Amino acid sequence: MTQITDEQYRILLTFRCALRHFLAWSQEQAARVGLTAQQHQLLLAIRAHSGPAPPSIRDVSEYLLIRHHSAVELVGRITAMGLVARLPDAKDQRIVRLKLTARGEALLAALSTAHLEELQRVATTLHISEQFLDRLSQDFLGESSEQPA
């Protein structure tokens, strides 16, 4: 078993504290516009989905790490708020696709502007470059910025 150093423990604590502070700040921002943190994350998952078709409820349940039936309920609440529209899949009518409404787009854009500013502040504090954040996003989501030849 590898011996963990005091510095490594400090690094873990610093990173976890930064994440928790960012998430708490994010939750406050969402609440200020009448959303829960999970509803905000749903809007972001729909907007940031990079598949060829709009995301399905299954897609967003995977992004949010929740069960399918929980995603259905969450989508129902956010649809009732007028922020998301349900669309039938072109090939399989059993699949429901999700799209932000104009109101959902505007709300998410405002939240995202503030979140990007806060993320930059946190990254600067942690000495993390924008390139590193981009690479982390690509690696975590299994995407690549490299174009196939």
Image: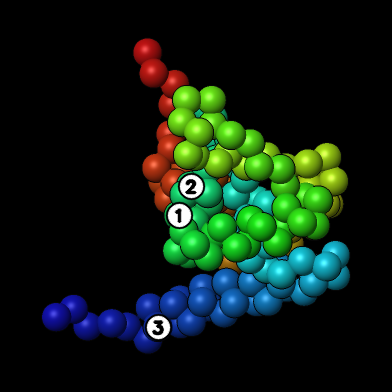
The three-letter amino acid code for the residue at tag 1 is Glu
Place of residue 83 in the rendered image (x, y in percent of width and height, measured from the top left): 77, 50
Nearest the eye: 49 or 20: 49
Left or right position of 7 against 44: left
Q: Of the residues under marks 2 and 3, which one precedes in the sequence?
A: 3
Residue 9 image label: 3
Q: CA distance from mark 2 to mark 3?
A: 35 Å
The three-letter amino acid code for the residue at tag 3 is Tyr
Left or right position of 3 against 73: left
Q: CA distance from mark 2 to mark 1?
A: 5 Å
Q: Nearer the viewer, mark 1 or mark 3?
A: 1
Q: Residues within 10 Å of mark 1 (few under 14, many from 20)?
A: some
Q: Does residue 102 lie above or below 23 as drawn?
A: above
User: Is disc 2 placed on a helix, strand or loop?
Assistant: helix
Q: Quadrant of the C terminus?
A: top left
Left or right position of 87 against 147: right
Q: Is the residue under label 3 in contact with that under label 2 (CB below 8 Å)?
A: no
Residue at (44% x, 77% y) in the render: 12
Residue receiving disc 2? 59
Q: Nearer the viewer, mark 2 or mark 3?
A: 2
Residue receiving disc 1? 62
Q: Does residue 37 lie above or below 132 as drawn?
A: below
Residue at (43% x, 34% y) in the render: 144
User: Is disc 1 placed on a helix, strand or loop?
Assistant: helix
Place of residue 138 in the rendered image (x, y in percent of width and height, measured from the top left): 46, 42
Looking at this view, name the residue that lies furthest to the front. 93
Q: Quadrant of the N terminus?
A: bottom left
User: Is disc 3 placed on a helix, strand or loop?
Assistant: helix
Q: Does residue 126 lie above or below 101 as drawn?
A: below
